[in-house]
Image: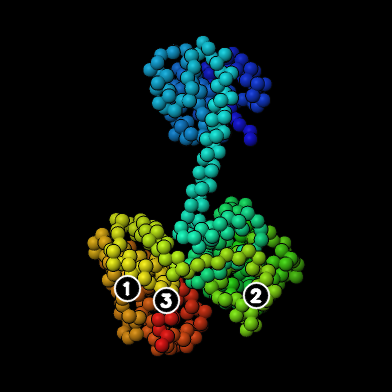
Amino acid sequence: MTQNLLIVDDEPDMLTLLKRSLEPELNRRLDTASSGKAALELIRSTDYDLVLTVIKMPGIIDLELLEQVKSDRGEAVTMVMMTAYGHIDMAVEAMKRGGLRFHHQTLRSRCAGDAPGKSLERSRLIKKNLRLHNECHSTDMFQELVGNSPKMQRVYETIRMVANNDLTVLITGESGTGKDLTARAVHALSNRSKRPFIAVNCPTVPEPILESELFGYRKGAFTHATRDKKGLFQEAHTGTIFLDEIGDITTTIQTKLLRVLQEKEIKSLGDARPIHVDVRIIASTNHPLSEKIKSGEFREDFFYHLNVLPIRLPPLRERVEDIPLIAKHLLEKHCAKLDKPLKRFSAALMDAFADRRWEGNVREMENLIMQGILFSATDEITLPDVGIGRKPASGAITQITPSPDLPYKVAKEINLSAFNTAYIGHMLTQSRGNVTQAAKACGLERQALQQIMRRYAITADPYRR
């Protein structure tokens, strides 16, 4: 790995001497600066590993230069200080401010020889340590996936294994288990991490629009196509596209996506010419695709092209030991987001969390915790604050009036959550948990109702009887 050095001295002859003597010895090019100000400009534009400088120069004195460099660059750059004023107090001050080594100027031509090699090794080790620390930190929570249970440890291990290749990943798991976060974690740990990540929620987009969104279209391809439009596959070129809930797309779109997987190319609507795309595909589903294959709703060949690297996310009820950690994480996250003091859970609430089946998984827990943060009158969140123990809504639909000091968006979301839970709960009660009949009664398509239910962590099971 190439390392960069800078020598700072207000004596031009000494600069020349040091440069000529050190360049051949270290086998690398050295930059020079004749003032603290010039050095600071170079340091801010170049990633130096070592700065060899003299205290008591004109302009910015070197102790101030040292302080500014440490402020801007931290420990990644090493500084060796030299001076003609060999007082112990200045040496101590330089060491306090971060100088690694201190040399008397009359000896600098001799002592400089051993300083660069040792200091460069220090910089190399520090940079390696920082890189490893950042890598560990970036993967600590796997994009907010939380849990230390054996099942989650296997998920993390699988994410690490599948991240650094371009093979297709299929993430399976119930609603609210973190499929979107898992896809983002795979992308973040891959060699495409600095390239685009495009997420598409497939069930929310009608088939004709989904096709044009994914593949783009040419001007005149249909009535309102007044200009060429790039599709999301082109937007994701060199990056990753995440097809969320792919089990809900039609066989027509499946056929077109199969071509992308096989040929690495797309065709825009109204264009016969294929367009090459370099895109990694990650897909997710909460449906058992094997059943959809049997019923003819899902192409078997498409499934096998998708299911190259499978990741299964366990439901929350299979990793109960993670509940306290997840609850703490969500509590801290949303107290900060909602600008509320950090609260705590009552013992009874934590017991209820441990006993709950969590049909909506982590998303359901997140919704409950957000309600608890907003509705609790004290610094403790209790069972009534989150509504645990209430029976599913089956009659009148009531409106919640949040505290007037809440922001508009938060107050609106509380009312929307309460309305949807009560309204859809009533419809599911009437249909005895039949989602298709409930959707018809609501005047919605089944997929649209399912999308709303996923958003508000509403499940049909409690209403079936």
Is residue 327 shown left or right of residue 121? left
| Residue 458 tag number | 3
Q: Secondary structure at mark 1?
A: loop
For this rendering, which residue is in front, 36 or 152?
Answer: 152
Q: Which mark sits nearer the N-terminus, 1 or 2? A: 2
Query: Going 72% across and 62% down the picture, which residue do you hit?
Result: 276
Question: Residue reaching furthest left?
Answer: 378
Q: Which residue is mark 1?
A: 388
Q: Residue at x 42, y 62 (%)?
A: 322
Direction front: furthest residue: 150
Q: Amino acid at mark 1?
A: Ile
Q: Which mark is residue 253?
A: 2
Helix, strand or loop status at disc 2: helix
Q: Is residue 71 left or right of residue 117?
A: left
- For the residue marked with disc 3, what is the amino acid? Ile
Report x, y in % for residue 157: 56, 57
Q: Is residue 135 above or below residue 18?
A: below
| Residue mark closest to the camera, 1 vs 2 | 1
